[in-house]
Amino acid sequence: MIFLGLTDILINLSQFLPEIKKPTKEVPFKQKLIWTTLALIIFFVLGQITLIGLDTSRPIVQELLLAQTVLASGIGTLITTGIGPIVMASIFLQLFVGAKILNIDLGAPDGRARFQALQKIFAVLLCFVEGAIYVLSGLLVPLPGFLPILILQIAIGSLILLYLDELVSKYGIGSGISLFIAGGVCLGIFWQAFAPVSATGAAVAGQQIGLVWNVLANGDFTLLLPLVGVLVIFLAVVFAEGMHVNIPITMGHKGTGGRYPIKFLYVSNMPVILAMALFMNISLWYMFLKDIPVVGYILSVLSWITKTPRIENQSVLMGFLIHFGNWSVIIPGLLQAILFIVLLIVVCVLFGWFWVQVGNQSTEAVAAQLSKAGMQIPGFRKDERVIEKVLLKYIPPITILSSIFVALLAGFGDLVLSGLTSGTGILLTVGIVYRLYEEIIKSNFEALLPFLGKLK
């Protein structure tokens, strides 16, 4: 009862937070494109503004640099936490709802509104909490007297991203979270591939420049492996995006027949985003709580498992090829890789199920939508329960299979790719760009409908 009372208080408090109002009419495609582009430009600009009062002489923890791909963050800049607070707020609430700690019916409009209100206020709170963790744990070291200022800057940057995400979701194309991830990955790939010098200016850093140099010098094609991995993941995602199951439906007893498509990638890439954000936060909380006896040990084990597997600072594949025969070096990396893949699959399946429930894509929700639209399954009586029974044969299995697929693709990509990007980054970017393409095509088609109507 106390928890329920606290929930009501938080929901009431969320009403006092600034809000970007929903558009009162359909936003034209050109305006959507302008708002989306503007949000992306602001994101890139924030990633170039260094935090005031940060001691830049201290090295940044490598695990945090690897996590930048998923969190769309730039460590040491205004977007240090990236989309972390937004994603973690969603994860916490999904766990609470799944464990029945929060009694919220996600299938009802009122329940989804309560969930979104709680998610927003949790995200705002986590902007400040995660900013404090980054600084107080020693991950980012402030100059003398700048500790509170540093925390405040990180929180403000996170809040800006929170509202940019809201802006894109209501007035732009797709979602801000997906847009920022794709933008960050593309920028990172371009820089890693073509940057002529390293950050220190001491050595060649660009993968493509390094590849040309190695081929010309000694015929070393090892740098081709990450490029081949990128191509394989790209083709696999594009192929999977086109796979779907068609369920026959009709409008009324003798109505027009049609098909309801259920895509193989039913859960999209959200399970991987949530899983990788959770893994990064495990490492973050471990660094903050490592001195607590039992909690610190548990988090240390989880942190080791959830880190991107490496063999001597190389990807698992590259490390295996380089150190083949030296099993004392290879076996720990292979063991971590196996545990990493297994845990990633389990977590992605759980988050895939949660996402289907939250996203109003569950069997019950889809059956209700089809029933309200007057649809029915041919050969069966018009009954929502009948539609639900038929959908049960498809939606739960596809939810599990698609969650496993994206987990394997991201996980094995992380084991193969080295330097250029990560499997997770490529998976997310290809899926996000594909959906943006679908959104753009849909928007343009809807814009053409009035014109096509005049041609009749």
Image (cartoon, rainbow, N blue to C red):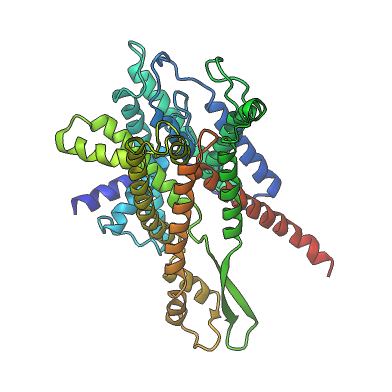
Relative image position of residue 225 (x, y in whole percent):
56, 40
Q: Residue at x 65, y 45 (%)?
A: 32
- Residue with the most extreme left position: 293
Relative image position of residue 68 (x, y in whole percent):
46, 34
- Classify residue 18 by image quadrant: top left
249 vs 349: above or below: below
Q: Residue at x 72, y 54 (%)?
A: 444
Q: Is residue 439 left or right of residue 368?
A: right
Does residue 321 show up?
yes
Q: Nearer the viewer, residue 78 or 313?
A: 313
- Classify residue 291 by image quadrant: top left
Q: Is residue 452 left or right of residue 250?
A: right
319 vs 231: above or below: above
Q: Is residue 169 left or right of residue 332?
A: right
Q: Nearer the viewer, residue 163 or 341?
A: 341
Q: Nearer the viewer, residue 66 or 117?
A: 66
- Residue with the most extreme right position: 455
Relative image position of residue 424 (x, y in whole percent):
49, 44
Quarter containing the N terminus: bottom left
Q: Is residue 368 left or right of residue 304?
A: right
- Residue with the most extreme front position: 325
Relative image position of residue 14 (x, y in whole percent):
37, 43
Does residue 13 show up?
no
